[in-house]
Amino acid sequence: MSRKTAIFILSFSLFSSLWLPALLGAAANPPLKQVTFIPQWVPQAQFAGYYVAEETGIYQKYGLKVEIINGGPQRSSAEYLKHQKADFASLWLVTGLNLWQQGTAVVNLAQIVQRSALMLIAKKKSGILRPKDIEGRKVGLWGSPFEIQPQMFFKQYDLKVEVLRQSYSVNLFLRDGVAVTSAMWYNEYHTIINAGINPDELTTFFYADHKLNFPEDGIYVRKETWQQQPELCRAFVKASLEGWQRAFAEPELALDITMRNLKKEHIISNRVHQKWMLERMQDIILPAHTQHQLGHLKRKDFQRATEALRSKGLIEKIPDFNIFYKPLAGE
Amino acid sequence: MNWLRRCGLTFKMNLLILSGVTLVISAILSLSYNITRHLMVERIEENAFSMAQATAYRINALLKAAEKIPAGMALTITKLQPDDKALKSILADRLAQNPELFGIAAAFAPESDKPPLSFYSRYFIRSYDRIKESPINYDYRTHDWYQIPKILDQAIWSEPYYGLSGRTIMTSYSYPFYREKQGHTKFGGIVCVDLSLNWLRNVVSSLKIGETGYAFLITRNGTFVTHPDLSLVMNETIFSVAESRGNPRIREIGRRMIAGEKGFTAFTGMLSAKKYWLAYTPLPANGWSLGVLFPQDELMANIRSLTRIMLGLGIAGFFLIMLVIRLISKNITKPLRALAQSADQIASGNLEATIPIPETRDEVGHLALSFTEMQQSLKDYIKNLTETTAAKERIESELNIASEIQMGILPKISPSPFPNHSEFDLHATIRPAREVGGDLYDFFMLDEQHLCFTVGDVSGKGVPAALFMAITQTMIKAQIKTHSGGVSADTLTQVNNDLNRDNPSMMFVTIFLGILNISTGELEYCSGGHNPPYRLTPAPEARVQELASTDGIALGVMEGFTFSSKRLTLAPGETLFVFTDGVTEAMNRDGELFTESRLEKLLTPLTEQPVTEITDQIMREIDNFSTGIPQTDDITMLVLRYNGKREKGGY
């Protein structure tokens, strides 16, 4: 055997051993489609369903390889979707509608959060027990899309208040810098409780209880993506909904996954807080006492939100419900 | 407690005394444990407080020192209104002068909240021992370090946060400054210093509290700033720990801590059920709270070992007392047991049993001596008794002999006393009340034709009566023989005189004396004060009648009395029943007498019965009458039936 022949055989066998299994594997399973998804905020139980779907192979089962981009104060999911930095995004309904107003046609593939978790919290010792007690007080609000419901709330109760733009911590409220603070039920409310204030020491106003139930988190995609790859979109939604179901069925697993992702990003949090959040997510994703289908956007909720936005002069262009919302079941 | 009564003295003493001792030892142990524990806890409380407060003071002093820097700078900015260059050098200088600081910033309020916004800030940080600027390129108006002191209008320490490296925990002290504008004061901005909390962690973790004690620091929100378990730090608040542990007590204590209270309380650990004492005290500068945990088991180990030693001593004492009881009870019970054995021997009749005398002169010794005396007394008594019994036996045997002699004096009635005389049937019976009696009967043939018979009753009973009876009988026998043909009255007169003549004991005797002519049935009789006999006449008359009285008196009463006799003739078949008052004066239970009338009634149907049958029948009736009553008087009966003159051997 000549030296050349030996080298040839050696390189051929090397080539085969490296590439042959890959080629055979590719023949057995079609290649996974790479997609990206961005939630509105940092990793936490608010998005447990997506992280569970990702880590337990549900996306893979649907032929997807999903990269979850971490949201947060520096990364707006709406911007990411708008600028095609993400294929799918979690957005509030009003944010989705706002994108239309800005000229970005997006499609709601699933309305995950049915019941608004946005709320106002006051300390009872500050004398606030009813909406009218808020009159003239300092109220902490977040920016868009979190200020739409409060503004309508103040209008509804004819309240003049001193609005302060609040940070993402509850310290201003804890130090009595504001009498009333904005909070998410699944997050800041529990943070306040675990800063040592007892629930019975607080007065809470849920917008949902004041005819201001705006559905919150939903799965959005750009319209062209939907038009070009409806199957891909359906696969993503199906897998995500399955992820949510699994997260509610196996909360400990969901918490393990959440905590892992959270620590990876050096997010300050703890397991009981995430547990609270996951439980509240179940409450608002699958509200009790309602005939609700997971991920369904009700026409009535859509109309209420659009009506509110238009009355505030925030949007003029209102997409048709059937163009805006593309449910799985509708196909 | 019946079983206890059956137990021995040693066991009882052991049981009772040792129960008492156990009780006392237990009481002392538990009391001493509790007192020691109480004192210990008090000491721990003092200790814990002083430790917590010293540490809090140390931390507070450092915080206070840091507070002075922005305060001074705020004043400088307000007064001097430095330009950008001057401000930069002031900030950089201050940072350089204060190595404990990580960063220092001045952030100015925008001229207007309306866009376009004009942010102006300068921020210097320490990086690898160099001072460098780090621009703030975000809208700081909604950040806690800027917003909270601005709104609250007061300097404030921030909640801890991770520094730029993501590893260092920092806290900032923000100090608001103001600017004069058009005559009124307006918020001008914030001066802020950043402080690494690594030093704080060192201070807190340097607290050595036994092997397993530790300290922790929480913020005004309850967030852990330092804790041996680093996973708690920054991530958890004392309230989230309370929630995850499901322990509302931790939450309660956390609320007190963040409220700025001081306290000392029992506490379970954050991560385990281990028991601690917790002393907590606030840091006045920033309202954080320092908790110092003292492990109970470690601190109580001393008390436990002390208690163990005391328990050991207690047990030793217990056994010592047991031993002492054993010795004492041995000293008491051993002689007692020996004494009991001797007593048993004595009880079973061995009066010679030796009684052990213990050497001690205590109660047991005394008892033993008394026992010895009792044994001696018993011996004497029994000796006495033996002698008395012997004497009594001798007397009794003599009395028996006397009785035999007396009975020997009386003529034999069995076999038939007069087998050659079919003219009459005679039967007599006597039952003395004692071994020897005072009654007598006698009969004998004076000659071929005359049967003499007597029945008498001497006053008194017993040996003297028997002797008197014998004398009387002998005298009558002797006297009547001198009167041939027999004159009963003369005989009694003579015998009476003889008896009176020498009768110092003043005894007397009633006597019935009869002489029957067996050929004719003629009866001469004389009674010396004796009960009148009955004459029984067979059917058809079937009569019982007393013999007529001869008006005689008892013999031995009056000398010179002249007795008289009477005569009568018995028809064949007639019977004479002579008796003593032992018959008629026999008594029943109710104190009633047998009486003559009862006797007459009983005799009436017996007139034709054989003579032995008459005595037997009457004797049975008397026995029936006085059943259960001891016989008080001698009973004597003599029955004589005249059959008439018959041919010899007519039967």
Image (tube, helix red, strand yellow):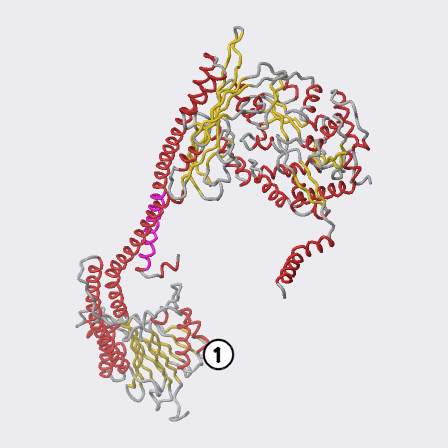
Residue B25 sits inside the magenta stretch: yes
Image coords of residue A17 (percent x, y): 65, 58
Magenta-colored span: B11-33
The chain carrying label 1 is B
Image coords of residue B516 (percent x, y): 33, 82
Q: What residue is drawn where x is 35% and y is 43%? A: B31
Residue annotated with mark 1: B540
The picture quadrant where one finds residue A100 is: top right
Image coords of residue A69 (percent x, y): 65, 37
Looking at the rendering, in which quadrant would you find the N terminus of chain B? Answer: bottom left
Residue B17 sits inside the magenta stretch: yes
- Residue B262 can be seen in this image: no
Secondary structure of the magenta portion, mostly?
A: helix
- Using a 10 Å C-alpha cutoff, classify the residue at mark 1 as few (fewer than 14 neighbours), some (14 to 19) or many (20 or more): few
* Mark 1 element type: loop
Amino acid at pointer 1: Pro
Looking at the rendering, in which quadrant would you find the C terminus of chain B? Answer: bottom left
Q: Is residue B13 above or below residue B229?
A: below
Left or right, B46 with reference to B324: right
Q: How many marks?
A: 1
